[in-house]
Image (cartoon, grey):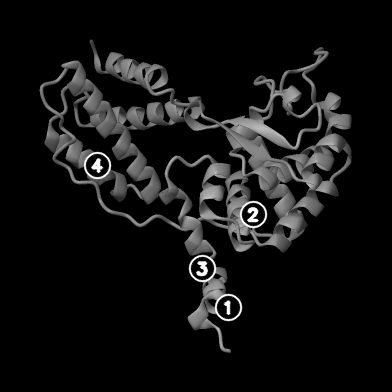
Amino acid sequence: MSAAGWVDAFLEMMAVERAAARNTLTAYGKDLDDARAWLARVGGDLDVAPAETIEAYFQSLGARGLSPATAARRRSAVRQFYRFVLEEGWRADDPSRRVAAPKAGRPLPKVLSRSEVEALIAAATDRDGGQGLRLACMIELLYASGLRISELLALPLNALARDPAFLTVKGKGGKERLAPLNPPARTAVKAYLTARPQFLPRGAKDSPWLFPSRSSAGRLTARRVSQLLEEAAMTAGIDREKVSPHVLRHAFATHLLEGGADLRVIQTLLGHADIGTTQIYTHVAGDHLAQVVRTKHPLGRKD
């Protein structure tokens, strides 16, 4: 079997045995394609590359100016691929094992203030007709429930047709969780549903998706949502580099923490498997937490 066949088998294993999401499989595929393209330039491939060549590839990731997160993800993809290959007995060695992964600090997430979120929603609502109703609805849902963009765009129409107080969301690894809907989000959904028919694919009487589109995909794409958010940010006078669907998820978590929510509750609402992933928000909301200690701790108060 060729290296290409090994990659296909690895991605199939990830999909079947580990229930990896489509976006995860796409990312792994692109990362391994990058490794294969680099190896091809030096006369090799994943099936025959020695440890020295894999080490050189890992070093090239930093030299190419990739972000630390992207470089780390590509190293991880290659390492997991070779562990699979070794388990299958297709190679007798793991050429990625001798290379130590660099330790990099996790960057703090970008966060919008509450006033910026309000300005963003106002800018979306000011757009003409159904376009404004749809964008305001998406922003309200992302901010009210902490949804990932993939989770938002995968919502079926029937998930919100009866004005629920909670959504059942299928997150990473197929795990389900409940996501709350506050009154503004529910109001925004009701307003959008009146305009939703104008976004249906041409000739279609309806669509199973909450956010259908006339594109070939049949529903809105993450790229298009990001473009719409950037336009709203510019209207609101917010740096468009600061706004993205994931930033609204960060705002959801940070503002909850600032409001006194327990970190374990936030972990559940975000669908994080590890509390360590959620703890990053304690750094983002550091000033607030320091004030809580000063005002609530017995030794911090002046009698």
Camera-nearest residue between 157 and 95: 157
Q: Nearer the viewer, mark 1 or mark 3?
A: 1
The residue at which mark 1 appears reads as: 295
Residue 34 placed where, x, y %? Answer: 34, 32
Write down the residue under mark 3: 286
Q: Is residue 141 visible?
A: yes
Q: Amino acid at mark 2?
A: Arg
Q: CA distance from mark 1 to mark 4?
A: 49 Å
The three-letter code of the residue at mark 4 reads Phe
Mark 4 and mark 1 in contact (Cβ < 8 Å)? Answer: no
Give the residue at x 34% y 16%.
8
Residue at the disc numbered 4: 58
Quadrant location of residue 88?
top left
Q: Nearer the viewer, mark 2 or mark 1?
A: 1
Q: CA distance from mark 4 to mark 2?
A: 32 Å
Q: SS of the residue at dot 2? A: helix
